[in-house]
Each structure stands twice: as structure tokens, then as C-alpha cells.
Amino acid sequence: MKKLLALLLAFTMIFSLAACSGGSSDETWESELGTQGKLRVGMAADYPPYESYDADGNVVGLDADIAQMIADELGVELEIVPMEFDTIISAVTAGTVDMGISCFSYTDERAKSVLFTDTYMTSAQSCIASTEYGINSLEDLQGGLVGAGNGTTGMEVAEAMAPEYGFSTQPGEIAVMSESLKSGAMQAIITEKCVCDSYIAANPGKFQIIADDLTSEEIKAITNMNNDKLQAKVNEIIQAFVSSQAYSDLVVKWFD
């Protein structure tokens, strides 16, 4: 009888402990936000039409609108936290921000540090050059200087191509490097195709694309490795959004 009572007591304790330790199953995406009621999003605002500053100093662009849409669907306030692109992943892993939404192309290396959401845009890397200095093809870059954003897949492409075409690479902000293209101090920049198109449209007759479709990439948002519930909730929002008319309207707004 004593043995039976002891076994019953042991089972009771096990079930009690299991119930107490099941806190993780009770957690929701809300509990994964660093600040309750607020979605903090890291964004590098030098990448139009994905993100840039308007005349009033506000961050605007496709990513800014998508971040706002996600925050609205979550029912929380959006806080865009401007930062350098190559610091966003570390900010997400440290919990300084809840998400990174800044034209992040999926790579296996990045996926070792953060969770990626579903795709909300596809893109490709292109090479843009001035129209004034005789740089009309990749072969013309021999002995020249090619820039790309810090920590971007554009830089990975540039570094991979450098030995074949005989140019040097330099990281930096696209807005700053575009001025170097105008002056001839830099011969080309490798960046997203739509970013190239944006700078061409803003500088009529000054820039041209000399190589297109250097990669094929999927653009996603990123979250902390521990925030799988937030990731899952955002995936639900993205899946519904990309098949909606609102998404088509947003693409037209920023890319046409």
C-alpha cells in the first residue's frame, strides 16, 4: 500500500511539474516583443525605394510601409529604428529591435543568426555606372573601384567578381557612393536592381546599368532566433498581404 501511495504521489508531482514547466507553450508573440505594445524595426534608410528619408526626415519606402502594415495587423505601435545595414542583424540578435525589415536577402549564412520570415519581394543584383567616363560593361571596370553596401549581398557579388574583372571593392552607403560615381572617383556600384533604377530616375542621364540579373534573391524580414511565435504571426500577415490588392498597389506606388 505504501508503495502504491508513493507511486501515486510521484505521478502527481510529475504532472504538476509538467504543468508548471509548460510556460513556453502559453507564450504568445506579444511576449516576444521587447516593449509591450510596440514593434521596433531596424532599418537602414539609404536604399530607395525600399527605405530612405523624405524631406521632413521621415523614413519612407516599401519596407517602411510593410513595417507599418505588420504593426497595424499586430495591433501595436511601430517604431522604426534607423541604423547602419550591417548592424541590424546584431541588433535583432541582441534584442535591441524586434525585427529587421531592410531589403534583407535570404542567405544560409544569415540564417545561422536570425529567423527569416516568408518572402515579400524578389530581387536581383545589378551594376550601375556613370554615363560620363566610358564604363559601359563589366570589362571596362579593369583597374577600377566598385562599391557596394556594407554587409550586403551586393558586396558578396562584387568580391566574387573582382578577380575576374580586375577591380577593387569598397563598402559604404549607396547615397554617398553615388556621388563618387558622378565625380569619377568610383567606377561602379553593385546593388539591388530597383535601387539602381531609383538612382537612375533621380539623376536623368547620369547613370546606366551595365550588368543586370547578377543574382536572384528573395527579400524577407528577420526576427530573433528565439522569437519563432512572432515569426509565425508575421508569416500569416505576409502570406495574406502578398496575395492582396493592397500589396499590388504598394508595389506600383514604389516601383512604377
Image (tube, rainbow, N blue to C red):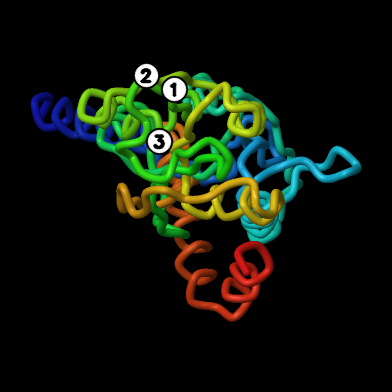
Nearer-the-camera pick, 44 or 201: 201
Looking at the image, which residue is at 57% across and 75% down?
A: 248
Q: Tell whether 213 sits left or right of 57.
A: left
Question: Local crowd at mark 1 within 10 Å, few (<14), some, or many (≥20)?
Answer: some
| N-term mark: 1 or 2 | 1
Q: Tag 3's secondary structure?
A: helix
For the point 91% across and 42% down, the residue is 56
Q: Quadrant of the N terminus?
A: top left
Distance, label 1 to label 2, CA atoms, is 5 Å
Which part of the image, by quadrant, shows the C terminus?
A: bottom right
Residue 2 on image: x %, y %: 12, 24
CB contact under 8 Å: marks 1 and 2 = yes
Q: Where is residue 216 in the image (x, y as percent from the top left)?
A: 31, 53
Q: Tell me the CA gap for discs 3 and 2.
A: 14 Å
Is residue 30 shown above or below 3? below
In this figure, which residue is indicated by the disc labeled 1?
Answer: 145
- Along the viewing direction, whichever of 181 and 101 lies nearer the viewer: 181
CB contact under 8 Å: marks 3 and 2: no
Numbered label attached to residue 154: 3
Give how far across and how far down residue 151 sits, in percent: 44, 25
Asked if residue 20 shows in the view, the reply is no
What residue is shown with label 2? 168
Q: Name the residue located 55 percent from the left edge and 78 percent from the top edge.
A: 244
Q: Which amino acid does label 3 sit on?
A: Gly
Residue at the bottom extreme, as displayed: 245
Q: In which quarter of the image is residue 65?
A: bottom right
